Image (tube, grey):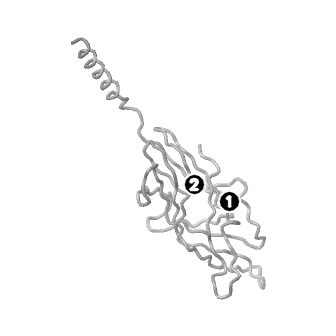
Amino acid sequence: MNRTWLLVLSLVALSFAFGCSDPTAPSAGQVQVRLTDAPIDLSDVTAVNVTIESLELFEAGATDDEGTAMNRSGVVTGEGLTLNLLDFQNGESILVATLDAPAADYTKVRMHIASAELVRPDPNDPALSIVEPIFVPSGKVDIPVPFSVAGGETTDILLDFDAALSVQVNETPGQHRYILRPVIVPISIH
């Protein structure tokens, strides 16, 4: 009989301890995604414009279609955010998306790219520019970024969208001259 009471009291104590969490503790934190670019080696290029349609955040264990759309400040729903990657070199970065995310572990950020173009001066008239489309074979880029969100804290992710490595020149006649194969790596997470 003593053992039974001891077992019952232990179970009651355990259920009380696990059931009484702090109701004022934040259950979500904020995630911010920023972009930067390593310098490009194409000396005559003045812009590498990329239009980002959306970003998604994936919790650990989520399936491929269970991403959560992130907010893009200043971007009208249904429109993309067009950035000249060359504007964000030498330590410059831009905030591209935020999300009040549940406190959890996350594994990746998915970026949807709608279009891209390369701008260079016209060799016949330097006051003019030549805009050349960059073919985007896949508009979806998965960026492995393992991190945890703690309640009440902000997690800042800085991604390097490397324009020099992402833009490939295709010498095959009759094919797309430029192809975008995005090389995006996390630089810092804090």
Please name the residue that numbered disc 1 is placed on: 37
Label 1 close to label 2 by CB (< 8 Å): no
Whole-number angstrom distance, CA of label 1 to CA of label 2: 13 Å
In the displayed structure, 22 sits above or below 34; it is: above
Neighbor class of circle 2 (other Cα within 10 Å; few <14, some 14-19, many 20+) is some
The amino acid marked with disc number 2 is: Leu
Tell me if mark 1 has few (under 14), some (14-19) or many (20+) residues whose alpha carbon lies within 10 angstroms of its own.
Answer: many
Report whether 62 appears left or right of 161: left
Q: Left or right: 7 with respect to 72?
A: left
Q: Quadrant of residue 165?
A: bottom right
Compared to 18, does 159 lie above or below?
below
Q: In front here: 9 or 161?
A: 9
Along the horizontal axis of the image, is 29 left or right of 127? left
Secondary element under disc 1, as helix, strand or loop, is: loop
From the image, tell me which residue sits under label 2.
95
Q: Which is nearer the N-term, disc 1 or disc 2?
A: 1
Q: Residue at x 72, y 76 (%)?
A: 120
Q: Position of residue 12 (x, y in %)?
A: 27, 22
Indicate the quadrant where residue 35 lies: bottom right
Q: From the viewer's perspective, is residue 88 above or below residue 150?
A: below
The label nearer to you, 1 versus 2, is: 1
Image point (42%, 44%), residue name: 102
